[in-house]
Each structure stands twice: as C-alpha cells, then as structure tokens.
Amino acid sequence: MNKAYLLIGGNTGNRFANLENAVNHIKKECGKQLLISHIYETAAWGKRDQAAFLNQALLIETSLTPTQLLHAVLAIEAKMGRHRQEKYGPRIIDIDILFYNNAIINEPFLIIPHPALPQRRFALEPLGEIAPGYIHPVLKKSIKLLLEECPDPLEVEKLDN
C-alpha cells in the first residue's frame, strides 16, 4: 500500500460541510484515512480579494498509483462542483497531492512533491500537525523546519473542530 499526504481546502459555500464531503469522497474513492489535521483558516493566498479559505491535511493509504490518485481527486473536485475558471480564484474545493510515498515525479500533468509547498504556510501548518518529522524528499528538510523557514506572512488560524 502507498501513503499519500493530501491538502483539501475551499472558500465558497458551506466551507466546513465541503471539507467533510471531500474527506468522505476521499475515503470512499481513494483509500483509507490514517491521519487528519484540525481545520485551519487563512486569508486567500495569491488573490486576496475573496473570502478566507479553510484547509485540512490528510494522510491516506491507497492502492492507487500517483496518476490514478490525481484522476480520482480531480473527479471528486468536479463531482463537488469545482470549476477551474481563474488562477487562485474562489473554489468550492481544492484537493492537492502534497506527497506520495517518497516519490519524486516531474511530469507535465503531475509534480510531486507539490512544488509550492515550502512557500505556503496554509499548507505547512496543517501538514505540520500530522507529519512534523516527515522529510521532504527533494529538499531533505522536515515539515517542521520548512514551516519555520516559510516566507509566507499570512496568518493561519487553527480552529476548534
């Protein structure tokens, strides 16, 4: 079995229900949930004139290959009503593959580890909750250290859930 770290997030509709719905779809269509972080709220990153995002990190165990996992999460996004119209724009759900085992994949349609992870506090905070000691296979740094070095100034608030 393979292990994959995912980040889910969104800022439109019922944000809490959308995260819960995404988690349920991931369990059903991608694999067994091993760990899940608290929910975190952050101002929009990249395009600030929109509602704040909720984000959550998951560790799943999956029999899917990286490409199959990508197709599965894209299908979940579509099923939940995600329309890719504007880069960094509002969205009902976004599901990113952060890591897949210790794989390093650089394909036109799939890059793992997620290339922007070290610059995104909203992803590192929830990931750091469930995997602080995980070593980034390219940078050879722990998630805890990446979080300490993260240049992103946006405040990330851990919510009680």
Image (cartoon, rainbow, N blue to C red):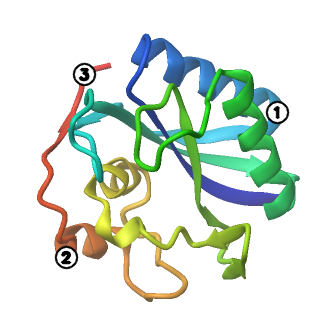
Query: 3 or 17, which lies in front?
Result: 17
| Residue linked to disc 1 | 29
Task: Specify which label sits upstream in the sequence, 3 or 2.
Answer: 2
Q: Position of residue 42 (x, y in %)?
A: 23, 39
**Amino acid type of the residue tagged 3 in the rendering:** Asp
Q: Quadrant of the N terminus?
A: bottom right
Image vertical order of residue 133 relative to residue 81, above or below: below
Q: Position of residue 149 (x, y in %)?
A: 19, 76
Q: Quadrant of the C terminus?
A: top left
Kindly tell me whether residue 31 is visible in this rendering.
no
Q: Nearer the viewer, mark 3 or mark 2?
A: 2
Q: Position of residue 30 (x, y in %)?
A: 79, 40
Image vertical order of residue 51 relative to residue 98, above or below: above
Callout 2: SS: helix
| Residue linked to disc 3 | 160
Label pair 2/1, CB-CB below 8 angstroms? no
Kindly tell me whether residue 83 is visible in this rendering.
yes
Callout 3: SS: loop
Disc 2: CA contacts within 10 A as few (<14), some (14-19) or many (>=20): few
Image vertical order of residue 22 relative to residue 117, above or below: above
Task: Specify which label sits upstream in the sequence, 1 or 3.
Answer: 1
Label pair 1/3, CB-CB below 8 angstroms? no
Q: CA distance from mark 1 to mark 3?
A: 27 Å
Callout 1: SS: helix
Specify the label residue 149 is tagged with.
Answer: 2
**Amino acid type of the residue tagged 2 in the rendering:** Glu
| Residue depicted at x 41% and y 20% | 12
Task: Specify which label sits upstream in the sequence, 2 or 1.
Answer: 1
